[in-house]
Image (spheres, helix red, strand yellow):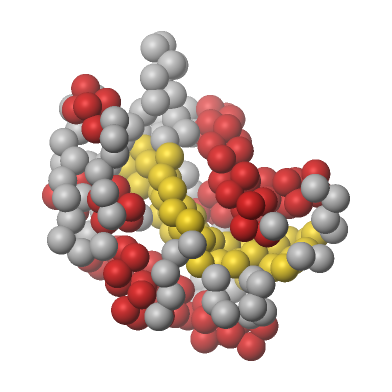
Amino acid sequence: MLLDIVIQSVNEFQADCLKICEKNYPTIHNQGMKEHHLGMTFARRLARTLTEFEHHCQYHPIEISPTNELPHHFRISSDIGTVWVITHHMISAGETCRKKLFKTVNSWKEEYGYAIQPCDLLILVNDHWISRATKSRELIHWWMGELPDDIEQYSAQGITLYESESKFAQTIEHQFGISPCYSKYGHPLKNSKQQQLVRKYIQLFAVLQWS
């Protein structure tokens, strides 16, 4: 039940991000959302979805490592389980950036491992602005394990996607002994004139469950 609500929230989150980007990021190009906005918006969306299904819930920011930045990792507690949200803006999509994501997951596990229950879920919420760099153009394949079916839509916007030798799922299985129970990517931004999806801006989601 909790996984179904999280998946529904991910799908509805795309519309939330379109609204917040129109309001706060009129010139979003080559940047992406601030991690605080990304994490807070998803936490609020999940809380709304849980409430719509008549589940009492609360959400609070969590600290994984000392920082002076606004909070961007959250804990949403409900009567059917807890969802932990780790937010990461993938600036380059290179190896250093990817390792930082796994390091954050490890720090979360070390910090909050005592509080993780079998029914809890961890969701990774990431965004990236696709550049000309090879690692950037490999990102979708690295995350999903396959290229998009509508790959010609990317080509139409001047984006050539590549296959990645490594895979997100394989790496997280190797490091933590766990596989994602749900993975998705999306493009919430639309071109203001043609109302086409802006394929260069991508959001990535992965849900994991520790038993």
Horizontal and vertical percent for residue 94?
Answer: 22, 59
Q: Which residue lies furthest to the front in this view?
A: 1
Q: Which residue is drawn at 73% across and 46% down?
A: 49
Q: In this view, does 206 lie above or below 208?
A: above
For the image shown, how many numbered marks are present on the structure? 0
Can residue 36 be seen in this snapshot?
Answer: yes
Q: Is residue 127 left or right of residue 43?
A: left
Q: In this view, does 115 lie above or below 42?
A: below
- Name the residue nearer the viewer: 174 or 89: 174
Horizontal and vertical percent for residue 162?
Answer: 16, 46
Q: Which residue is drawn at 29% across and 30% down?
A: 150
Can residue 133 be seen in this snapshot?
Answer: no
Q: Residue at x 22, y 27 (%)?
A: 152
Q: In this view, does 175 lie to the left or right of 36?
A: left
Q: Residue furthest top?
A: 193
Q: In which quarter of the image is residue 211?
A: bottom right
Horizontal and vertical percent for residue 24?
Answer: 54, 34
Q: Quadrant of residue 170?
A: bottom left
Horizontal and vertical percent for residue 7?
Answer: 58, 49
Q: Which residue is drawn at 47% across and 80% down?
A: 107
Quarter of the image with the N terminus is bottom right
Q: In this view, does 180 lie above or below 5?
A: below
